[in-house]
Image (cartoon, rainbow, N blue to C red):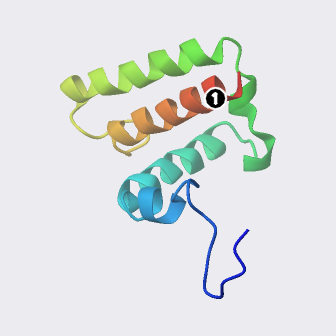
Amino acid sequence: MSQEPGKKLDQGKSPLLQGCLAYFPKALLAVADVSAYGAKKYNVPYADKNWERVPDATARYSDALARHILAESFDGLVDPESQLKHAAHAAWNALARLELLLKS
């Protein structure tokens, strides 16, 4: 442990602001909009994390991810139901899938 002034012992820690939020601010805002849309659509509070309890969730989020990527070919960039970008829906599903895989 360093006793030198002005030191921050954060080597090896994830750069959340610099490496995620600063890199992808618009993309993450679009994903947050998908979260808000889903919370309203399914009438669940964020704290409920209902999405984690979906049966066979990893496979279903994988399928939803693929459907949104494919739907861009048919619908264009915007999902007709939500009026949000298919890519944002795909990213949300990819994050949900990844979160579940990291927890297992």
Residue 39 versus residue 5: which sits nearer the camera?
5
Q: Residues within 10 Å of mark 1 (few under 14, many from 20)?
A: few
Task: Say whether residue 38 is visible.
Answer: yes
- On the question of residue 79 being in view, the answer is no
Q: Quadrant of residue 11?
A: bottom right
Please name the residue shown 43% across and 57% down the image: 19
Q: Residue at x 71, y 29 (%)?
A: 52
Residue 7 rendering spot, x and y as whole percentages? 61, 79
Q: Left of 75 or right of it: where is 24?
A: right
Q: Quadrant of residue 99?
A: top right
67, 93: nearer the viewer: 93
**Residue type pointed to by label 1:** Leu
Considering every residue shown, the one lying at the far right of the view is 48
The foreground one among 32 and 9 is 9
Q: Residue at x 50, y 45 (%)?
A: 34
SS at badge 1: helix
Residue 74: horizontal and vertical position, in percent?
21, 23
Residue 44 falls in which quadrant of the image?
top right
- Residue occupied by mark 1: 102
Nearer the observer, 79 or 97: 97
